[in-house]
Image (cartoon, rainbow, N blue to C red):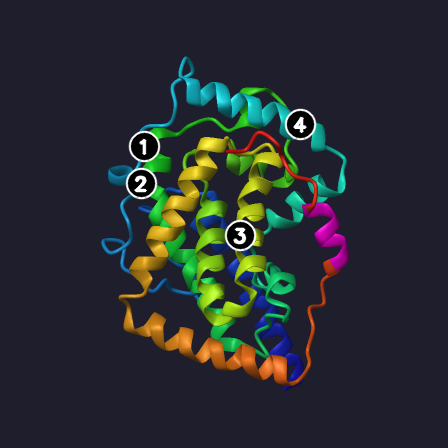
Amino acid sequence: MRHSRQSSSRATSLVLVAFAFVAIGCGNQSAVKPASGAPQGYLAKTEVPDSLALLPAPPAKDATAFAQDEAVSKEAHTMRDTPRWAQAARDAVLSFPEAADTFSCALDAPVTQKESPHLYAMLARMLMDAGRTTAAAKNHYMRPRPFVAYGESSCSPSDEPILRTNGSYPSGHTTIGWAWALVLTEIAPERTDAILARGRSFGESRLICNVHWQSDVLQGYFLGAGLTARLHANAEFRSDLEAAKKEVAAVRAKGLKPTRDCAAEATALSQKLKVVM
């Protein structure tokens, strides 16, 4: 029986790995249906914020905003082979269970399927909604990513084949990272500053990873906020949010702590880009 549960858990994790790419890495969802066992989002495709309607076109190459994009990208290059680069590579992972624990240091509590099943599932379902939110603009503009434009590498080379065929604008990672951060501040309001700072650094990791331009990331923050607001109109989401608050309180009562090396993460994140707006 134990072996059966472990096999089922591994199978579910593999499904989440694949579907994370569908949700964020591959913006074109019109031809993709959720795999068996993959989480469903809270919102229908017609209910998520329309990124194509909401966002301006990405900056033209002769625009001041694109000059800023290039300046940020140039500075990000200086962080290669540093702890911040390694952290950006960790932040690139959106597969579960790894991604569920992204904010554990900021939250000062572990996020696991065993101890906080509602929160774990909620984060996974939000990932699906974020993918639908960014898909329209990604597919329409198909903006080349920095590592493609410059003929370079990124911090996640195994993802590069799929990223080359996926639009850079807006940033899907930033969208979900900021949405997660906003929701987690409701779950642990006393940790608001740490959680929001982590949400911002999660987006900035995409710049350091060489897979997004600054304008991609800025619009990702915007869409993440819009998605979070829309989710609060969904009764099922609100129910899971209330359950997640109780779970985190219970985890705290048990004295459970993050399993990540929070000191190392803090050191890495202390390396900041100076020209980011």
The residue under label 4 is which amino acid type?
His
Left or right: 37, with 104 as reference point: left
Give the distance between the C-alpha atoms of the residues marked 3 and 1, in whole angstroms: 26 Å
Q: Earlier in the sequence, mark 4 or mark 2?
A: 4
Residue designated by label 4: 77
Location of residue 243 by image quarter: bottom left
Q: Position of residue 258 (x, y in %)?
A: 69, 68
Amino acid under disc 2: Ala
| Residue placed furthest toward the top | 62
- Label 1 belongs to which residue? 140
* Mark nearer the N terminus (3 vs 1): 1
The local secondary structure at tag 1 comes to helix
Tell me the SS state at disc 2.
helix
Residue 109: mark in rendering: none
Tag shown at residue 136? 2
Q: Nearer the viewer, mark 4 or mark 2?
A: 4
Tell me, yes or no, whether the two marked residues, 1 and 4, touch with CB atoms within 8 Å.
no
Q: CA distance from mark 4 to mark 3?
A: 21 Å
Whole-angstrom CA distance, mark 4 to mark 2, is 29 Å
C-beta proximity under 8 Å, tags 1 and 2 = yes
Q: Main secondary structure of the magenta part?
A: helix
Judge from the rendering whether residue 121 lies leftward or rightward of residue 99; answer left or right: left
